[in-house]
Image: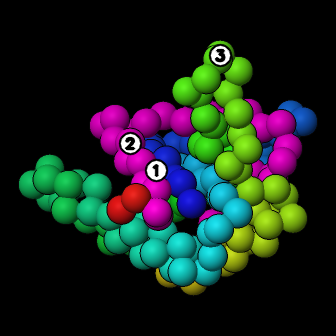
Amino acid sequence: MRLVIQRVTEASVMVDGSYTGKIDGGLLVLVGFEDNDSESDIAYAVKKVVNLRIFDDAKGVMNHSVIESGGSILLVSQFTLYAQTRKGNRPSYIKAARPEKAIPLYESFKKELESALGKTVETGIFGAEMKVSLLNDGPVTIWIDTKAD
């Protein structure tokens, strides 16, 4: 399971000209899955996402989590996080999980994030052509691979 986490002051996802998810501040989480991902990867990732101390405290030090800061989460599926680019110029996505495996993992991840965060997690639409907009705050961008950490 791979994640790109961006601290944002705002972020949104549009599909076919309509917003499917929108937050004013918090985290934009791009997530991709591979075939051998499981509920243990989800549990690890949820704990990391909601507890990462990447929000400023009163002294301007990154010392608060998204929970402590009162922020929201916008979750977007992104199989391209598993792009293999070593050979040629056309990325291969062979390591990315097929939808029949990835969709249940995505839905479970969303549900567990909501439980840990204590509020609804905004989303895109799995497999749709999405337009993602964000205003990165910092910028702060964190990459997590549950198999490498």
Quadrant containing the C terminus is: bottom left
Foreground disc of the pair 3, 2: 3
Q: Secondary structure at mark 2?
A: strand
Q: Secondary structure at mark 3?
A: loop
Residue 42: quarter of image: bottom right
Q: Tell me where the magenta segment starts and ends, as one range.
A: 118-147
- For residue 141, which numbered disc appears in the image? 2
Q: Name the amino acid, label 1.
A: Ile
Residue 47: quarter of image: bottom left
User: Can I make out residue 36 in this image?
Assistant: yes
Q: Position of residue 98 (x, y in %)?
A: 82, 56
| Closer to the camera in the image, 49 or 97 | 97
How far apart are labels 2 and 1 at the CA level? 6 Å
Q: Name the amino acid, label 2.
A: Thr
Q: Position of residue 11 (x, y in %)?
A: 57, 43
How many numbered marks appear? 3
Quadrant containing the N terminus is: bottom right
Q: Can residue 133 be found in the magenta stretch?
A: yes
Lateral position of residue 74 relative to residue 116, left or right: right
Q: Position of residue 56 (x, y in %)?
A: 22, 54
- Of the residues under marks 1 and 3, which one precedes in the sequence? 1
- Of the residues under marks 2 and 1, which one precedes in the sequence? 1
- Residue receiving disc 1: 5
